[in-house]
Every structure is written in structure tokens, then in C-alpha cells.
Image: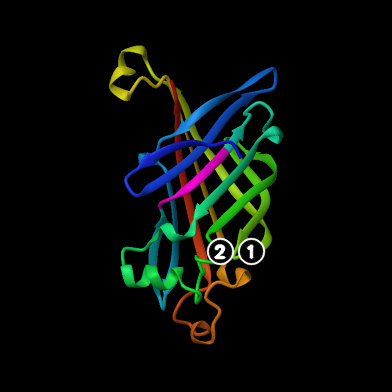
């Protein structure tokens, strides 16, 4: 996997994003970590509880002219989970849930990408959690691509173009053996997990 690493305090974010053209080479883009998020939500009894993963790598090769040539890979560091509660986060890292020590990564890798509407795409591939692999569909929306006017570039660090994407999906945690101990087979924690990903990228 090709990587372009961004270093932040306590956080490693790796990424390569390319918007390609059928008659020319792909262009390298950099993920803007301050405007990129991988979030999730799950219910505790009836209350939705949200969280994030702060360390991840994203590789997205996007060809707007030939979407079928596109691909996406996401690798998430499970230990970077953050729900705003240290005790809960430690429990989620434990063998009761993600077992981060034995299964440190969540991975998604597409096998096909197809356009399903204006600025909307569907990446179909394999999602791996705790070494359980399942077919998974990830809907992706291109929010926009914008050239930065020359006078504005210095104040934005010299970037010349910006593109943004978002993705949203749902999964059943039980399909991947997450939180399926006898204590968790109650209705305390919901089985349906909602995932929301926002990615902003740029290039000089």
C-alpha cells in the first residue's frame, strides 16, 4: 500500500488519494487530517452514543471519467477508538469487544466501484474486523472539487485544489464477533452500528 504520512500529536494518519484521468496519470492528493473524520454511532438502551477512530490510512484512486477504474482502501487503528469515556474506550479495546491487542486493525478494500447517481458511487468490497471477512458496500458521495484562486493560495498553505467526499453505511457488529459475550447478548448495547466518514483532500 502506498502511503503519505501526516504526523500529528499522538496520531498517525496515512493517506494517498488520486483523482485519475483515463488518458493521463493520476494526480496525488493529500488528506487534510483536520477536516477528515471516521465516526460511528451505536445505541446504549435507547440513547445513541457516538465515537471516532483517530488513527487510520486511506487510499482512494478516483477517476471521475471512468468510475469503474476507481478503488478505495481504508485501514483503521482499533486502539485509537475514542467515545469520550476512558473506561468505556478501554473496555471496547478489550477481548470483550474488539480485542485490539490481537486484532489491531479494521480494513475495507474495494473490488469494484460504480456510479449510482450524480456524484454518488458505490464501492463494493471486503470488510475485515477481528479477522472476520465479509462482503460490504460503502456508498460514497463526491461533495465537490474546487480550484483555489491564486490570491487565496498562500493563506491556505499553497494548495491549488480541494476535493471532499463522504461515506455512510451500517453494519451489525455481531456479524464480526464484536461484543457477543454472554453479558452482551442483552439489549443494553445495540447491534446496529452506523458509520460516517468525511474526507477532505488537497494538492499544491
In the rendered image, the vertical position of residue 20 relative to residue 168, given as above or below: above
Tell me residue 119's x, y (percent). 57, 35
Q: Earlier in the sequence, mark 1 or mark 2?
A: 2
Q: Residue at x 51, y 53 (%)?
A: 76
| Vertical order, 68 against 156 (above or below) | below
Mark 1–mark 2 contact, CB under 8 Å?
Answer: yes
Q: Quadrant of the C terminus?
A: top left
Residue drawn 46% across and 40% down?
Answer: 199
Q: Which residue position is annotated with label 1?
A: 131
Residue 13: % across, % down: 44, 43
Measure how far apart labels 1 and 2 are at the Cα level: 7 Å
What residue would you read off at disc 2?
A: 103
| Secondary structure beneath label 2 | loop
Identify the image quadrant of residue 86.
bottom left
Q: Residue 198: percent from the left, percent from the top?
A: 45, 44
Q: What residue span does the magenta drawing correspond to?
A: 54-59
> Along the line of sight, which residue is nearer the eye, 47 or 178?
178
The residue most toward the left is 155
Is 122 within the magenta? Answer: no
Q: Position of residue 95 (x, y in %)?
A: 51, 74
Q: Which mark is residue 39?
A: none
The correct choice, above or below, for 13 with respect to 78 in the image is: above
- In the picture, which quadrant includes the N terminus? top right
* Residue found farthest to the top: 150
Q: Is residue 57 magenta?
A: yes
Figure disc tally: 2
Q: Residues within 10 Å of mark 1 (few under 14, many from 20)?
A: some
Magenta stretch, overall SS = strand
At horizontal 50% and vertical 73% (from top left) the residue drawn is 97
- In which quarter of the view is residue 140 placed? top right
Amino acid at each position: 500500500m502506498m502511503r503519505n504520512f501526516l504526523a500529528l500529536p499522538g496520531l498517525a494518519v496515512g493517506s494517498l488519494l488520486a483523482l485519475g484521468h483515463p488518458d493521463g496519470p493520476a494526480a496525488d492528493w493529500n488528506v487534510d487530517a483536520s477536516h477528515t473524520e471516521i465516526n460511528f454511532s451505536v445505541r446504549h438502551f435507547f440513547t445513541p452514543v457516538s465515537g471516532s477512530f483517530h488513527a487510520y490510512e486511506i487510499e482512494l484512486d478516483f477517476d471521475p471519467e471512468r468510475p469503474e477504474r476507481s478503488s478505495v482502501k481504508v485501514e483503521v487503528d482499533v486502539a485509537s477508538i475514542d467515545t469520550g469515556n476512558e473506561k468505556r474506550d478501554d473496555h471496547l479495546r478489550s477481548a470483550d469487544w474488539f480485542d485490539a491487542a490481537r486484532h489491531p486493525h479494521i480494513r475495507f478494500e474495494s473490488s469494484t466501484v460504480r456510479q449510482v447517481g450524480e456524484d454518488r458511487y458505490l464501492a463494493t468490497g471486503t470488510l475485515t474486523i477481528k479477522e472476520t471477512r465479509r462482503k460490504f458496500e460503502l456508498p460514497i458521495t463526491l461533495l465537490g472539487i474546487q480550484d483555489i484562486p491564486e490570491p487565496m493560495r498562500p493563506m491556505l498553505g499553497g494548495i491549488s485544489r480541494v476535493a471532499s467526499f463522504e461515506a455512510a453505511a451500517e453494519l451489525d457488529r455481531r456479524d464480526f464477533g464484536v461484543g457477543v459475550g454472554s453479558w452482551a447478548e442483552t439489549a443494553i448495547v445495540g447491534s446496529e452500528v452506523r458509520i460516517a466518514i468525511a474526507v477532505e483532500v488537497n494538492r499544491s
